[in-house]
């Protein structure tokens, strides 16, 4: 600690070691080989600011070789109100710069590494997208291939039951293909647009029965989880096909409603036909019209299946949870 | 039956009324619509041909590559080309459709499992009559072609 004239008032042991003695009362300038005017200027700067002042002094070494020390100056005020200056001398901060430089090098290395990793990941992502697109393409093409196989058999002579079976199977494949297409088309890959999904499959199913069926679809804009898509596609296909064929008898009205009711999604397919004619549709013996397939698929997605038979027609209701299943099987 | 100059199922309207040069000439000769099927999967091509023939259309032939499609279109002058996108060889269905449109003015109905927006954008310059995404039924195929034939 020096006064404003640069005389040493206090010095710690390290300062004494550096000077070779405790330089109390000596001019600080005399301890250095830095010009006295520069020392005075440093002290003057220190007294003029409350901030730390950084400088450097040349100190004579004990081995005759001088060394440059960093100087950190600060203004002090003693109990009597006199202004003093503290000077802390430290070895050149080359080591700090080296540390900083090393740290920057490490950060640069890390950035380079991360960029390399990002490039690899981006390439892998592009590859995976291409593979996914290819996979979807293959699936759809294969469905088309299977439709071709069935249609080829359909052209050959055979009993009417075989033709009916082939037509039904083709229609189911088309429903699966429609679900597959919607699964790939959108940006969101975990769910399907409900309104388009229901409408597309219902229209295809009704159209397959004949042009006389009047179909009305009222489906809410919602999302259907992918894991429900294929069973639900087949359920819609079966129920609309049944309603058009048996209920509307190829010339009546079929109505499809799809909406959310709280946590549940509700599909209702209505026709204006005679219904089951008093026979319970849940009867195991009633295996016509694909109802056993609907029952099995409802069971798969945990859906509740119910029938409302009125003089004006039959309504089949499928109610299932909208929550995505947490496990795969 | 007159080939329509605009529209079709999901088709564009970039061709002016008055028609398609090569197509109009071919249609003027009368008879059912004459179709070229370009599809590299033999089973699918065969079923398309059978479904169209059953519906009364004349299938001029089937081609499995872009080069074969262009050559066949030049020699047989179809009214309509059903064009798959992925084909045998280095060139795809969009390349073939572009060349057929350039040389003959004949437009295509694309039948593809690969009808994403970027593919459709690429195909715009070929002035497609429409898109029939796979998988489709024979009934849907015939309905789409009939819609084009009836204009």
Image (cartoon, rainbow, N blue to C red):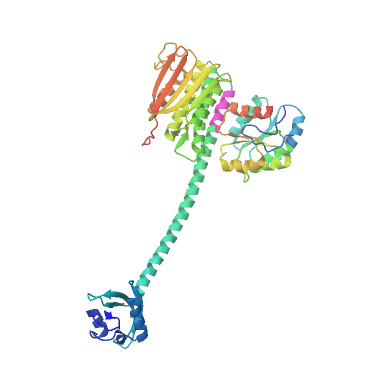
Q: Is residue A156 above or below residue A111?
A: above
Residue A253 belongs to the span the image colors magenta? no
Label total for image: 0
Which quarter of the rendering shows the C terminus of chain A? Answer: top left
Quick check: A228 left or right of B98? Answer: left
* Image position, residue A85 (x, y; %): 29, 77
The residue nearer to you, when weighing A35 against A119, is: A35
Q: Which residues are magenta?
A: A144-156
Is A61 placed above or below B106 here?
below
Q: Residue drawn at (49%, 36%), measured in percent from left and top?
A: A183
**Residue B44: image x %, image y %?**
59, 33
Please tell me which residue is depicted at 53% across the width and 35% down the height of the picture. A140
Front-lying residue, B26 or A40: A40
Q: Is residue A207 left or right of residue A308?
A: right
**Quarter assignment of residue A298:** top left
Q: Left of B60 or right of it: where is A203?
A: left
Q: Is residue A183 above or below residue A122?
A: above
């Amino acid at each position: 600690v020096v006064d404003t004239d640069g005389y040493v008032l206090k010095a710690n042991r390290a300062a004494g070691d550096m000077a070779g003695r405790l330089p109390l009362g000596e001019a600080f300038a005399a301890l250095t080989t830095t010009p006295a005017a520069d020392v005075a200027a440093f002290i003057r700067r220190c007294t003029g600011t409350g901030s730390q002042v950084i400088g450097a002094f040349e100190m004579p070494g004990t081995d005759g070789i001088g060394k440059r020390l960093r100087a950190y100056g600060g203004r002090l005020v003693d109990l009597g109100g006199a202004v003093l200056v503290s000077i802390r001398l430290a070895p050149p901060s080359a080591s700090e710069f080296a540390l900083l430089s090393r740290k920057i090098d490490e950060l640069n290395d890390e950035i380079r590494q991360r960029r390399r990793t990002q490039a690899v990941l981006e390439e892998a992502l592009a590859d995976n997208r291409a593979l996914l697109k290819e996979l979807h393409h293959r699936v759809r093409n294969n469905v088309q291939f299977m439709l071709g196989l069935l249609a080829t058999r359909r052209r050959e002579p055979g009993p009417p039951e075989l033709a009916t079976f082939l037509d039904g199977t083709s229609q189911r494949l088309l429903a699966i293909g429609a679900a597959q297409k919607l699964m790939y088309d959108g940006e969101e890959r975990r769910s399907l647009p409900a309104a388009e999904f229901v409408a597309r499959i219902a229209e295809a199913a009704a159209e397959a029965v004949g042009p006389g069926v009047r179909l009305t679809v009222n489906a809410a804009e919602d999302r259907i989880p992918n894991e429900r898509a294929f069973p639900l596609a087949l359920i819609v296909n079966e129920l609309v096909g049944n309603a058009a064929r048996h209920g509307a008898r190829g010339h009546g009205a079929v109505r499809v409603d799809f909406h959310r009711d709280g946590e549940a999604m509700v599909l209702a397919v209505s026709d204006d036909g005679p219904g089951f004619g008093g026979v319970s549709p849940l009867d195991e013996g009633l295996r016509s019209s694909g109802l056993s397939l609907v029952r099995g698929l409802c069971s798969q997605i945990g859906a509740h299946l119910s029938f409302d038979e009125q003089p004006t027609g039959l309504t089949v209701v499928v109610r299932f949870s909208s929550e995505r299943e947490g496990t795969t099987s | 039956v007159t080939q329509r100059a605009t529209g079709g199922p999901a088709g564009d309207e970039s061709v002016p009324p008055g028609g398609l040069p090569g197509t109009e000439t071919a249609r003027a000769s009368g008879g059912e619509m004459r179709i070229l099927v370009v599809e590299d999967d033999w089973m699918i091509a065969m079923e398309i041909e059978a479904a169209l023939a059953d519906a009364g259309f004349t299938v001029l032939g089937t081609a499995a590559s872009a080069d074969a499609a262009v050559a066949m279109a030049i020699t047989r002058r179809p009214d309509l080309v059903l064009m798959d996108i992925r084909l045998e060889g280095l060139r795809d269905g969009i390349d073939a459709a572009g060349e057929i449109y350039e040389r003959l003015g004949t437009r295509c109905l694309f039948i593809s499992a690969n009808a994403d927006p970027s593919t459709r954008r690429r195909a715009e310059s070929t002035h497609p009559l429409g898109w029939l995404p796979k998988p489709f039924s024979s009934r849907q195929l015939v309905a789409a072609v009939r819609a084009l034939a009836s204009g």
